Image (spheres, rainbow, N blue to C red):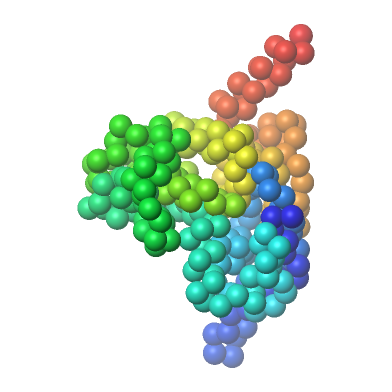
Amino acid sequence: MLIKVRKLERVYRMGDHVVRALAGVDLDIEAGEFISIVGASGSGKSTFMHLLGCLDRATGGSYDLNGRNVRAMTDRELARIRNNDIGFVFQTFNLINRTPAIDNVAVPLFYGRQANTNAKAMKALERVGLAKRYKHKPSEMSGGERQRVAIARAIVNNPSVILADEPTGNLDTRTGEQILDIFHSLHQSGVTIVMVTHEMSVAAQAQRLVHMTDGLIDVDREVTPELRRDLVHSGVLGAKRIEREQEEIERTSA
C-alpha cells in the first residue's frame, strides 16, 4: 500500500471557534493509481492534499506513506519526504521567473545535493515534450509550457506520488487537454497521481473518484465509462479524449 490514511483529522482553532477541516478521513491508495479528489469549497479537499503532501501536520489519526508513519516524522524527515517522495504540481506553477526551465526543473535535485542535475532535468523536460525550450525562462513561455516545466520538476526525482492541485485551473480548454494528456502518459508509465480539481470533466480523467463533503469522504468509486460520460456533461475539458477512447473501444469490439 502506497498511502494508508485512517481517521485523519485537521482542526483549526480561531479564538473560541473550532473548525474541523478534516473530520476523520479513511483512504487507501495503491501504487500506480490515478485518483481525483473533488468537492465544494470548504469540503476539506485542499486540507487533505496539504496533509498528504506533508505541507501540514494532522491533529489526529494516522498517515502511512510507503509503510512509514508520517505523523511521527521530524521536520527534517518531512522535508526529505517532500523533496524525494512527493512531486507537486500547482495551479499557479510556482516557478522561479528569472531562471531557465532546466534550472527550475533541477531545484529538487539541488536540495537533494544530487550530481548530474542538468542531465536529469533534461530527461524530465523530454518526458513532457519541452526539451527544446530548456533555456527559456517562465516569463518567455505560455501558461501550458510553464505547467509542463512544473510537471517536469515534479517528476525529476522519480517520486512515489504526484500531487496535482487544480493543474488545469489557469489554462484554456485546449491547453488543459494537453496537460491531461501528459498526466495520462505518466500514469501509463506507472506514476501514481492524486489530483484535486473542482471541474468534474477533469475529474473524469482519473481511474477513481473521491468526493469530499464537510471534511469527510462521502463517495469513493471507480470511474467507469458510464460515469465518465455523466461527468463530462458537467464541463467540456476532457470530452475529446473520452470520445476518442469510446470510439476506440467500439472499433476494437466491432
Q: Quadrant of residue 243?
A: top right
Left or right of residue 199, residue 20 in this image: right
* Residue 124 placement (x, y as % from top left): 43, 41
Tally of marks? 0
Residue occupying image coordinates x 34% and y 34%: 131
Residue pushed farthest bottom?
Answer: 16
Residue pushed farthest front?
Answer: 115
Residue 96: tell me if it is visible: yes
Return the residue nearer the eye: 58 or 134. Answer: 134
Return the residue nearer the eye: 122 or 246. Answer: 122
Residue 167: tell me if it is visible: no
Q: Quadrant of residue 16?
A: bottom right
Residue occupying image coordinates x 54% and y 85%: 14
Residue occupying image coordinates x 66% and y 17%: 247
Residue occupying image coordinates x 42% and y 49%: 153
Return the residue nearer the eye: 231 or 176. Answer: 176
Does 53 sit above or below residue 101? below
* Residue 66 placement (x, y as % from top left): 67, 59
Quadrant containing the C terminus in the rendered view: top right
Does 62 sit above or below residue 194? below
Residue pushed farthest top?
Answer: 254
Quadrant containing the N terminus in the rendered view: bottom right
* Residue 202 placement (x, y as % from top left): 57, 40
